[in-house]
Amino acid sequence: MTRYYLLLTMMMLSTGLPLFGQGYVPLLSTNKTWDELYSDVNSITGLSGGGRLWVAGDSVLNGRVYQQIRRRAFYPLEGPVFDEPYGLTEATFLWGLIREDTAARQVFVYDQNEPGEEFLAYDFSLLPGDTLWYSDWPFILDTIQPFILNNGDIRQQFFFRMYHSPPIEYGMYIEGIGGETGLFHPMDYPIGPHNYLHCVAENGDFVYGANCETYVLRNHHHQLVQFKPPYPNPTNGPLQLELP
């Protein structure tokens, strides 16, 4: 089976064609978790934090339905220095809001710095040569290549370059998984302190990343901390969140 996937990948790479036959795989799903770590060159371990994200409920803002993304932080189990193995705190937080248009194959993030606004974070409908406008910068889709997940499933991996002369390779994201610099900001430049996507699980099984089974040893249930529903909902203004 491994040989089959290897041969398929080599064939797709040689032809330069993306894998479109499988249909679109949505990014957001209640059966997924995203583990992010925070890279920090000033830390002894090169890391200074991280957490686990998941989809939990929805909110209506300006007539748009967003998925609530909640987070639980990692903490070191064996000392004050942030290093694996990690535990997961029991406290959970509303980390942000994301909206996915599955028909258009686009994913939007609610802009917490500009209430009422959103920005396009992912566009899986693009073809090589198309432009993604991210943070007011143009990024050219260079190639789409097959990416084999840990379970053998194949997804499309999008590689971008900046509109620059000469072109600069910059950023990538994977269908149904997310971006290399995290779920919310897939095209941020990975230099200096920054988030990066470490592992992704579906139905509790890690389908993306390495060393995913061992670096988190204490996994509390998400339901240990209950939140009051965000309010007002729906709203055209800021969203409020309270602990019980």
Image (tube, helix red, strand yellow):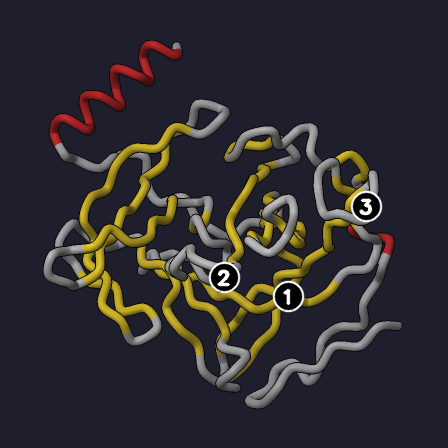
Q: Earlier in the sequence, mark 3 or mark 2?
A: 2
- Pointer 2 with pointer 1, Cβ within 8 A: yes
Marks 3 and 2, Cα distance to the nearest angstrom?
Answer: 23 Å
Q: Which mark is residue 221?
A: 3
Specify the amino acid type for callout 1.
Answer: Trp
Instruction: State which mark lies toward you, 3 or 2.
Output: 2
Q: Residues within 10 Å of mark 1 (few under 14, many from 20)?
A: few
Q: In the rendering, at what x and y percent does residue 126 appear?
A: 22, 55
**Residue with the most extreme bottom position:** 237
The residue depicted at 58 percent of the width and 37 percent of the height is 202
Q: Earlier in the sequence, mark 3 or mark 1?
A: 1
Front residue (pair 26, 53): 53
Specify the amino acid type for callout 2.
Answer: Phe
Q: In the rendering, at what x and y percent does residue 193 appear?
A: 52, 59
Q: In the rendering, at what x and y percent does residue 159 appear?
A: 27, 47
Marks 3 and 1, Cα distance to the nearest angstrom?
Answer: 18 Å
Q: Secondary structure at mark 3?
A: loop
